[in-house]
Image (cartoon, rainbow, N blue to C red):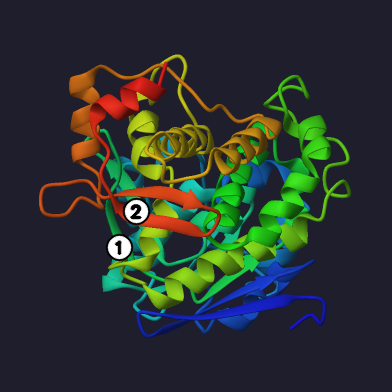
């Protein structure tokens, strides 16, 4: 491996999974590709914005670059129709049981590509190359794959760990500001649940974060000038990945400790699904930020979490240009969406409620009225 790379090893469901973080990490791809040559499912944005880098990555293990399917990214692609298109392409390519699928792109692309790999021929090799901040610290790590169905988030899926996850922050140079904000929501969550040093480091950089991503920092759909040299992104990404890796090592199938990763997600997924397809949708990061802010308010109201901690979290979310409130869905719709939460057991939704930094209640109860009180 490149001597500047950081390696995080996991064994998930009995399968080794290695995260390689560092400059040119993805050029280590060939180490994870047995014969025959892999096929590539590539996010359209990567193919358009990073063609030279993509060519260099593929040439290391497939000089002919003969098996590449370019797909649109985003949540709209996590549908059965897209999955069927991928299956038809894999069949046309004749991808065998010992083949390998390489996903290159953002979190939504990696979710559907990983699910295709998990289910084609009852499971083929899978390697992930995340190209957004959100994908690097969340979607690519931990072995969850899936698609949306019946208007609900990630309702169909499988646990299928990637043999290799290649994280190169250089990809982020072309990431639009909105994409950075989405990733920062998950980075803040990781810091809250597992790394107080990361939280303190981000808090100390509040002015820098606000200047890059805060309200009024610039257009959401444009890349952020000078962003890679502005803050210690590689260290922060490594810390966030280490938090998730430590949790999923201990609880791959989410029987207990892994539920910590759901902080902000129970309400967040409901809000994201409710606003999907509307003129004013919520991205995953925006929805999770609102979900975190709401459960912190509820925990403070109950005397379970210090007000000072909740204020610090909300201020950091705001510095990153993330919302902390939104209009509430109709009560019946909110309850329908919450009832579909995958963490639901024995007829109840199990909420993750904060008690402080690195202190969580993983089996909390929240009434709909509590949520409505803290949504606009």
Residue at the front extreme, as displayed: 303
Q: Residue at x 48, y 32 (%)?
A: 290
From the viewer's perspective, tell me whether residue 300 is left or right of residue 118: right
Is residue 164 placed above or below 75 in the rendered structure?
Answer: below
Is residue 294 placed above or below 124 in the rendered structure?
Answer: above
Where residue 234 sits in the image (x, y, percent)?
76, 60
N-term mark: 1 or 2: 2
Quadrant containing the N terminus is bottom right
Q: Residue at x 52, y 60 (%)?
A: 140
**Element assignment for label 1:** strand
Residue located beneath label 2 in the image = 146
From the viewer's perspective, tell me whether residue 169 is left or right of residue 10: right
Where residue 283 sits in the image (x, y, percent)?
50, 32
Q: Residues within 10 Å of mark 1 (few under 14, many from 20)?
A: some
Residue located beneath label 1 in the image = 158
State the residue in front, 373 or 33: 373
Q: Which mark is residue 84?
A: none
Where residue 131 sits in the image (x, y, percent)?
64, 52
Is residue 201 placed above or below 245 in the rendered structure?
Answer: above
From the viewer's perspective, tell me whether residue 69 is left or right of residue 58: left
State the residue in front, 289 or 276: 289
């Amino acid at each position: 491996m490149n001597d500047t790379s950081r390696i995080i090893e996991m064994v998930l469901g009995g399968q080794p999974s290695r995260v390689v973080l560092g400059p040119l990490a993805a050029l280590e791809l060939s180490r994870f590709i047995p014969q025959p040559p892999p096929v590539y499912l590539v996010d359209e944005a990567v193919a358009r914005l990073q063609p030279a880098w993509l060519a260099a990555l593929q040439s290391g293990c497939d000089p002919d670059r003969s098996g590449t399917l370019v797909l649109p990214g985003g949540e709209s692609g996590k549908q059965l129709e897209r999955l069927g298109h991928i299956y038809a392409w894999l069949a046309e390519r004749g991808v065998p049981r010992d083949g390998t699928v390489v996903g290159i792109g953002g979190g939504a692309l990696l979710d559907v590509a990983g699910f295709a790999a998990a289910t084609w021929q009852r499971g083929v090799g899978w390697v992930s190359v995340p190209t957004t901040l959100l994908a690097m610290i969340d979607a690519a790590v931990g072995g969850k794959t899936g698609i949306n169905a019946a208007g609900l988030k990630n309702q169909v899926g499988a646990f299928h760990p990637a043999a290799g996850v290649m994280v190169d922050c250089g990809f982020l140079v072309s990431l639009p500001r909105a994409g950075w904000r989405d990733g920062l929501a998950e980075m803040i969550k990781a810091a809250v649940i597992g790394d107080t040093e990361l939280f303190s480091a981000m808090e100390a950089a509040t002015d820098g974060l606000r200047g890059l991503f805060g309200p009024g920092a610039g257009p959401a759909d444009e890349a952020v000038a000078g962003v890679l040299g502005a803050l210690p992104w590689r260290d922060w990404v490594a810390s966030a990945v280490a938090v998730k890796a430590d949790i999923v090592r201990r609880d791959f199938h989410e029987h207990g400790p892994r539920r910590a990763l759901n902080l902000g997600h129970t309400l967040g997924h409901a809000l994201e699904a409710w606003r999907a397809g509307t003129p004013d949708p919520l991205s995953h990061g925006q929805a999770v930020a609102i979900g975190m802010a709401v459960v912190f308010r509820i925990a403070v109201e109950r005397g379970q979490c210090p007000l000072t901690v909740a204020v610090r979290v909300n201020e950091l979310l705001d510095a990153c240009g993330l919302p902390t409130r939104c209009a509430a869905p109709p009560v019946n719709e909110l309850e329908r969406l919450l009832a579909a939460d995958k963490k639901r057991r024995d007829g109840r939704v199990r909420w993750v409620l904060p008690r402080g930094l690195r202190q969580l209640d993983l089996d909390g109860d929240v009434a709909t009225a509590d949520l409505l009180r803290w949504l606009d």
